[in-house]
Image (cartoon, rainbow, N blue to C red):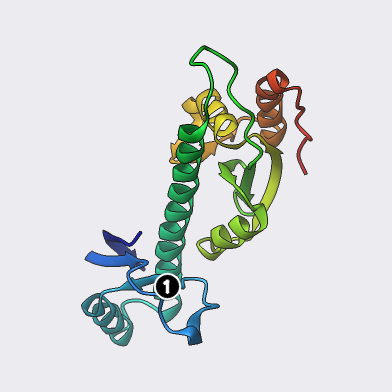
Amino acid sequence: MAQTFTADLRIGGCPVRGVTLNWGLFHGSEVRREAPSYGTDIDVPAVIEILDLITSGAVTAQEARDVLHKAAAKIIEKRNREFEEREERMEAAMRVGPRVPKQPAFDSRWVYVVSSMDNPKAVKIGVATQIESRMKALQRGSASPLVLRWSARGGFPLERHLHDQFGQRRIDGEWFDFRRVADPAQAIAGAAEEFLRQFGESSPGHE
């Protein structure tokens, strides 16, 4: 499903306001299918404004490239997450059986913890069907190399549990501040262990 987003971008300290970004409105040229931002596009007047900033020397081409890559990566991640959540709702709607209280079904998708090498105590707790592809998507929007700190199967139920457990540490969205924790991955693994025990599962620990 195509979506349109409007955002204010900041490139090298210069604001570019009201930028229209689209996802899925067209498939795009096969020539660029392997591009990290494939599937997203931006309105031409905004591109011209960014080029004018580069031409005037107000920003560098690398700064503009990094901001656009980050914007595309965030849109792609948002769409991936919405697809997975929609899939989960459809699966739940198709389940049949007596409507009585019971344990939640185990979700075999991966819950992962990543952080950058520059800031290892700021971690993202997310969920993905394929960790490798999700890591690649996240890396496109990060200037610093990202490191997978821990992972376990448990899907959205486990992710929600961890988000609730560490809610006071939330920075924004799925990012959490563990600056005062010696080993963030170990703390998260411990919280996951409690949740997974009800399914007879155990956390494999962190990398």
Front-lying residue, 30 or 185 = 30
Quadrant in which the C terminus is drawn: top right
| Residue that label 1 marks | 63
Position above or below: 92 against 24: above
Give the tally of numbered discs.
1
Can residue 124 be seen at all in this image of the molecule?
Answer: no
Q: At 28% from the left edge and 79% from the top edge, which residue is drawn?
A: 47
Task: Provide the secondary structure element on which disc 1 rests.
Answer: helix
Position above or below: 44 against 158: below
Residue furthest front as drawn: 97
Position above or below: 10 against 112: below
Can residue 65 be seen at all in this image of the molecule?
Answer: yes
Left-right relation of 197 to 143: right
Q: At 69% from the left edge and 24% from the top edge, which residue is drawn?
A: 196
Quadrant in which the N terminus is drawn: bottom left
Left-right relation of 189 to 115: right
Q: At 72% from the left edge and 20% from the top edge, which residue is drawn?
A: 197
Position above or below: 14 against 123: below
Query: Which residue type does callout 1 highlight?
Result: Glu
* Horizontal and vertical percent position of residue 40: 39, 69
Q: Quadrant of residue 187?
A: top right
* Horizontal and vertical percent position of residue 203: 75, 31
Left-right relation of 104 to 16: right
Front-lying residue, 92 or 40 = 92
* Horizontal and vertical percent position of residue 7: 27, 59
Q: Quadrant of residue 189?
A: top right
Left-right relation of 81 to 7: right
Q: At 70% from the left edge and 44% from the top edge, which residue is drawn?
A: 149
Report crowding for label 1: few under 14, some 14 to 19, many 20 or more residues within 10 A (C-alpha): some
* Horizontal and vertical percent position of residue 69: 45, 68
